[in-house]
Each structure stands twice: as structure tokens, then as C-alpha cells.
Image (spheres, helix red, strand yellow):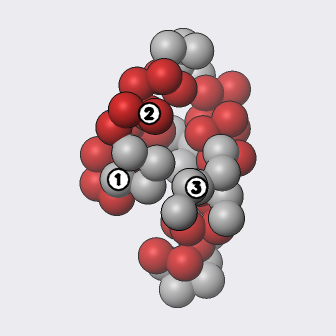
Amino acid sequence: MKVWEKIAEIYNGQMQLFIDKCPSAIEQRYHIIGEKRFRKHCNIGCGVECTKEYLELDIKK
């Protein structure tokens, strides 16, 4: 499952657009990939690419 799929699941099948939000706000609220993994992701820098990459990350179960 990808991060974007989990977000859609949280919102009952509707994908919410987070274009204007940093993934840190999403992660802080929902803890989708976990703090340790997010710290590694956050090192890539802020911006659209960061959000796109975050939404495509696989969720480990």
C-alpha cells in the first residue's frame, strides 16, 4: 500500500489534495510511515518533489 492509498482510505475513498502542505504536517497527524522513516525522507528537501515522493512511498506493515 502506498501513502496516497492510506490517505484515501482515511478519507473514505476520496484522495485529499495536499499540494500546499508539507508532508511533515500529514505525517504528524496520521503517522503513516513512522518518525524514523520520515526523518530519512525529509532530508531530500522541501517542495513539490518531496510531496510527490512521500505520497508514493510504500507503507511497511
Question: In the image, is residue 28 above or below residue 48?
Answer: below
Q: In the displayed image of the protein, which residue is found farthest to the front? A: 61
Whether residue 22 sits left or right of residue 16 in the image: it is: left
Whether residue 36 sits left or right of residue 21 in the image: it is: left
The residue beneath circle 2 is 38
Q: Where is residue 49 shown, x and y percent of the image?
A: 69, 26
Whether residue 47 sits left or right of residue 27 in the image: it is: right
What crowding class fits label 2: few (fewer than 14 Cα within 10 Å), some (14-19), or many (20 or more)?
some
* Count of numbered labels shown in the rendering: 3
Question: In the image, is residue 29 above or below residue 45?
Answer: below
Q: Nearer the viewer, residue 11 or 60?
A: 60
Res 8 quadrant in image: bottom right
Q: Nearer the viewer, residue 19 or 5?
A: 5
The answer to whether any part of residue 48 appears in the image is no
Residue type indicated by callout 1:
His
The reply to whether the C-beta atoms of the residues labelled 3 and 1 are less than 8 Å apart is no
Q: In the displayed image of the protein, which residue is found farthest to the left? A: 29
The residue beneath circle 1 is 31
Q: Nearer the viewer, residue 25 or 30?
A: 30
Q: Where is residue 53 shown, x and y percent of the image?
A: 68, 35
The residue under the point 34% across, 58% down is 30
Compare marks 2 and 1 and give the one earlier in the sequence: 1
Q: Where is residue 10 shown, x and y percent of the image?
A: 46, 76
Q: CA distance from mark 3 to mark 1?
A: 11 Å
Residue 59's tag is 3
The residue under the point 44% across, 55% down is 32
Compare marks 3 and 1 and give the one earlier in the sequence: 1
Residue 41's tag is none
The residue under the point 70% across, 47% down is 56
